[in-house]
């Protein structure tokens, strides 16, 4: 077994989307080759309704899958095909936009005004970009959770892990989407097959994701027991960790423990043409999508 080295660590970037939702973008747009088959990930959270309640009114999607995972509050959603529903705490929606859909998502806080969720975009291969749209709405109760002897907890949203299979199926890039909690002070190694590209996004606590032979990050001087020593800071809240090649990741949890999303998938290695929430392989396909929007032919029935 080989531990994946850490290629880089970065902080998610504050941005605004939809009708004025304040969120943090872990990655997205521009060069996303290190994340292939994934295109973008947003962390939307807050305890002030004015930061999120404007939501994400009607907008088009084509050529991708959007994965919404709610931790606190709720998200009401609807689309141009007449689908309606509400995602609550712990729920997941995996939407395959395929040939095209108009969609809206309107977040609401819990009783204390808190809202927290993630949205991940996964690319579709060229031969499936114009596939028929579909939803996989998954309630929290349907997501298996496995607990290891040391107290490590893993919710398996998609893919197979520790003998459990996530409820989302039939997804092109063989993704694995895990919500991992490692207790304070514990060290854990988690399998990630070498054909996958992988990243972790930390949203509670802190941890060290470097193996003993692959340190990362800047060393700094600190006083320990009255002596100057070199220490390495742990990775904390809203940090993105991008891994290199290998078949396991290693994490040493900080004293308060660490919780993170561990996402991996088989890269598509196909050209990407972007136009906001429409992602195709060529600019000609983007132009066709925009023509379809203008002519009323975007939704294929």
Image: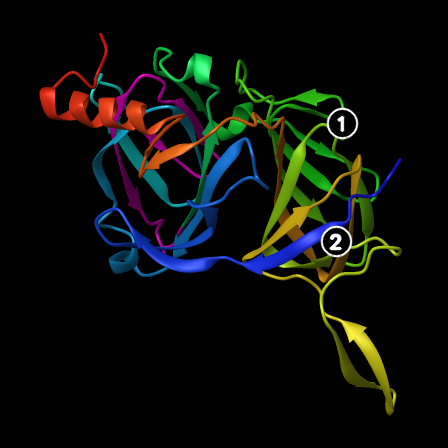
Residue 283 at x, y = what percent?
Answer: 32, 29
Q: Looking at the rendering, which quadrant does residue 48 occupy? A: bottom left
Q: Is residue 88 magenta?
A: yes
Position of residue 234 relative to residue 293, above or below, is below
User: Which of these two is toward me, 277 or 164?
Assistant: 277
Residue bearing mark 2: 209
Residue bearing mark 1: 162
Q: Looking at the rendering, which quadrant does residue 13 occupy? A: bottom left
Please tell me which residue is depicted at 20% across the width and 21% down the height of the picture.
80
Residue 298 at x, y = what percent?
Answer: 20, 19
Residue 106 at x, y = what percent?
Answer: 26, 40
Classify mark 1: helix, strand or loop.
loop
Residue 222 at x, y = what percent?
Answer: 78, 84
Classify mark 2: helix, strand or loop.
loop
| Quadrant where the image shows the N terminus | top right
Q: Estimate the spatial distance between the alpha carbons at disc 1 and disc 2, rounded to whole Å.
A: 20 Å
Q: Looking at the rendering, which quadrant does residue 234 occupy? A: bottom right
Q: Residue furthest bottom?
A: 226
Q: Earlier in the sequence, mark 1 or mark 2?
A: 1
Magenta extent: 86-115
């Amino acid at each position: 077994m080989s531990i994946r080295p850490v290629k880089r660590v970065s902080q998610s970037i504050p941005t605004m989307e939809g009708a004025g939702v304040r969120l943090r973008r872990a990655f997205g747009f521009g060069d996303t080759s290190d994340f292939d088959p994934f295109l973008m990930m947003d962390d939307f959270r807050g305890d002030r309704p004015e930061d999120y309640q404007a939501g994400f009114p009607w907008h088009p999607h084509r050529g991708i899958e959007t994965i919404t995972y709610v931790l606190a509050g709720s998200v009401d959603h609807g689309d141009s095909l007449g689908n309606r529903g509400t995602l609550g705490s712990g729920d997941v929606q995996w939407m395959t936009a395929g040939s095209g859909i108009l969609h809206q998502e309107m977040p609401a806080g819990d009783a204390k005004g808190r809202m927290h969720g993630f949205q991940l975009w996964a690319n579709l291969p060229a031969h499936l970009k114009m596939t028929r749209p579909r939803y996989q709405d998954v309630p929290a109760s349907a997501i298996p959770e496995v607990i290891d002897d040391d107290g490590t907890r893993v919710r398996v949203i998609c893919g197979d892990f520790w003998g459990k299979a996530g409820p989302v199926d039939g997804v092109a890039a063989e993704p694995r989407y895990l919500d991992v909690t490692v207790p304070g002070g514990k060290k854990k190694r988690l399998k990630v097959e070498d054909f996958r590209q992988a990243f972790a996004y930390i949203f509670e606590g802190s941890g060290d994701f470097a193996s003993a032979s692959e340190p990362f990050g800047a060393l700094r001087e600190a006083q320990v027991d009255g002596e100057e020593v070199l220490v390495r800071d742990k990775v904390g809240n809203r940090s993105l960790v991008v891994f290199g090649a290998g078949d396991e990741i290693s994490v040493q949890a900080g004293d308060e423990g660490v919780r993170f999303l561990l996402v991996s998938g088989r890269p598509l290695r196909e050209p990407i043409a972007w136009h906001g929430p429409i992602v195709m392989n060529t600019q000609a396909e983007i132009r066709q999508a925009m023509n379809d929007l203008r002519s009323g032919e975007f939704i294929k029935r």
